[in-house]
Image (spheres, grey):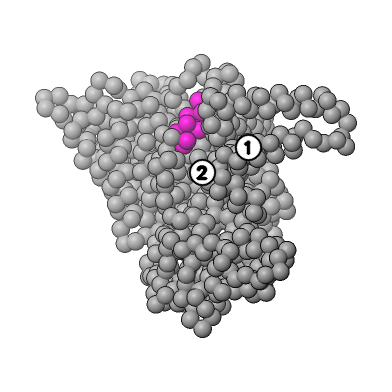
Amino acid sequence: MKSLDEAPGSERDRESKNPERGNRYETSHYKSALLSDPWKPCRRPRAIVKEWLLTLRCCLGAMCGMEWYSYAALGIVMAFLSFLMDLSVTKLLSAHQWLYMKLEGNSLLQFVCWTLYPACLCAVASSFSHNICPFSTGSGIPEVRTMLSGIEMPHYLSLTNMFAKFLGLICTLAAGSTVFLGKVGPFVHLSTMVGSYLSKFFTPVQANKKDKAAGEMLVVAAAVGVASCFGAPVSGVLFSVEVMSSHFALTHYVPCFFAAACGALTFRLFTVWSGDEETLQALFKTNFPTALPFYPLEILLFAFLGLLCGAASCCYLSCHRWILQFTKTNPVFIKMLATEKGLYSGMVAFLLASVTFPNFAGQYMASKYTMKQLLTSLLDSRQWSSQFHNASVHLEPEPLLEWSSPGSPVYLPLAFFLLMKMWMLVLACTLPVPAGYFMPVFVYGAALGRLHAEGVAYVFSSGVTSGQQWASINPGGYALAGAAALSGAVTHTLSPALLAIELTGQFSHAGPVLLATLLANALARSGHRSSFYDALSVSKRLPHLPSLKRACPQLPSVAVGQFLGVKPIQLQKAAGPAEIEHAVKTSSQTQIPVVDSHESPILLGFVLRSELRIFLRHAAAETLEKHLDEVCCVRPASVLLSPHSTVQEAHGVLSLVGDQTLYVTERGRLVGLLTWSEMKKILEDLAREI
């Protein structure tokens, strides 16, 4: 993170000139701060305990850097939180199903139970988030992307936000598949909050990485969030690279993989220790044929599925952008979302639950299944159409219990599911609750791939030819490819292809899955269309330049000189104590520019604020008046900008130089300066123009 806080004083500056002396000073200062508290009781026992802690710190630091322990701790903590959340949601869903089954025979009471349970949970989640921390609603990924781009947003990393997001997300997920929302986005946000606090905890014992520890920890946390949700470390890191960071440093790869592996392994171990699984295995069990998983002719079918998913993603993203714009402009929605968020969430959840009532339209869309059961059933390798037409089979297999409807083919429930879930998911995106939107799209893509495969199986009832033999279609492989293709097209990423393979362990379908995802991405990105997260960033008017660039390509080309404010405080090289004291009092910058003279403001460089304070102390003790250039070191500016430089160029330079101040000059004359705070204001102004 790019901090704008004031630079340390003269002691820190002298330490930087003498590293060995600075390290000795830091160690002695750290020990004295721990051991010298004369006013507290039990000084001797406390001193012994703290001495042991210091010894333990030295031993741990001798094996590897302390930052690696923080990465491991982040992965373990997030895996525990993910397991705890899944356990809580499972208990709440089981309670709902138990109550619904107990009311069997009374349709009215079953309807009340089916609708009011998720409606109350969504109302509680919305009211809780609104009253405790309004920043906890939504996905959280657009805000994390903005913070990783260099913009400070401390409210989104607060402890109250973490508490409200965690409990609110449990309530949202417990509403079940009627609301059809997931947990990936909010969990990535939770991971960054935990990473921020772990960074603050481990930073005092890290001697060399104090400045960049926080920013690196946030990048690592983004990968850990996905890995802890599904136990998929590699796709978690790729997701962090694609979605989160516009400038991903190569040095972040190893920490990301290490923390993601710790989180994924711990999450899998928790499922084993709880008795849910016997050993470490894929999260979604599949039984695809391994000898001949697919035939060469099916590559064309997978390619067509990719184009179909790309078209579906364009339709979904268009509806999503429309509903976001509608809720921002419609007076009724504006009033309800501003004052009655709990009531609005309850009403929308009640509507969605009414549509999915099993004795009504829900019987045609497998409404009794949870998200995991939906995906597991869609990944079944058997052809449902052949199961329906087999009159000798009296007992339906497990995946068909909710998808079968008397007197209708299997295509109708799948088509009805796709038709209804499209508008229901778009409407659910307006709920002001902590919720993720990745997994619902993933399941929707699996249903689209399943329908495509069942249709192909019906057309080629004898199988797909390959040489002299005929082979039956494996619908589960198409469902897997459809899930990866649609979710990748909606988010404009390729990581869902790897995620689909890691979730199922079906590496035999890596080629078709990747092909479908690439074609879906190509169609979704055509015409400079914004991704799902870009649309959220623009709707929330977040200062995230890549999102603004996709929404309005000409905005980043605006000259930075149009946004320069008043001329910054500057010092001439012959400045005396009075002028320097005035500059220190009126300017809050850590670097104050130095010019040749006020009449000829040619930029010579900058001087640190800490050096100016030392100069003032020495000037007060001495009788002989000295000038600035005689005492202070004027450092040359490494990077200069022109007023005609674009906002995109300035943003890129700021991302590379870190927390340095950029000076804007015209023919050598200083006309302004640019920091991350000014860049945030510029991007916010650009966001308002969209």
Label 1 element class: helix
In the rendered image, residue 301, in percent from the top left (x then y), is placed at: 24, 40
Residue 234, by quadrant, is top left
- The verdict on residue 128 being magenta is no
Which residue is rendered at x = 55% and y = 35% of the image?
A: 67
Region of the chain picked out in magenta, as a range = 255-267
Q: Amino acid at mark 1?
A: Arg
The residue at which mark 2 appears reads as 216
The residue at which mark 1 appears reads as 24
Q: Amino acid at mark 2?
A: Glu
In the rendered image, residue 228, in percent from the top left (x then y), is placed at: 52, 33
Left or right side of 406 for 541: right
Which one is nearer the viewer's eye here, 222 or 44?
44
Q: Earlier in the sequence, mark 1 or mark 2?
A: 1
Label 2 element class: helix
In the rendered image, residue 131, in percent from the top left (x then y), is placed at: 73, 53
Which one is nearer the viewer's eye here, 401 or 648?
648
Which one is nearer the viewer's eye here, 483 or 83?
83
Q: Is residue 347 visible?
A: no
Farthest-out residue, top: 278
- The verdict on residue 259 being magenta is yes
Which residue is rendered at x = 86% and y = 27% of the image?
A: 42
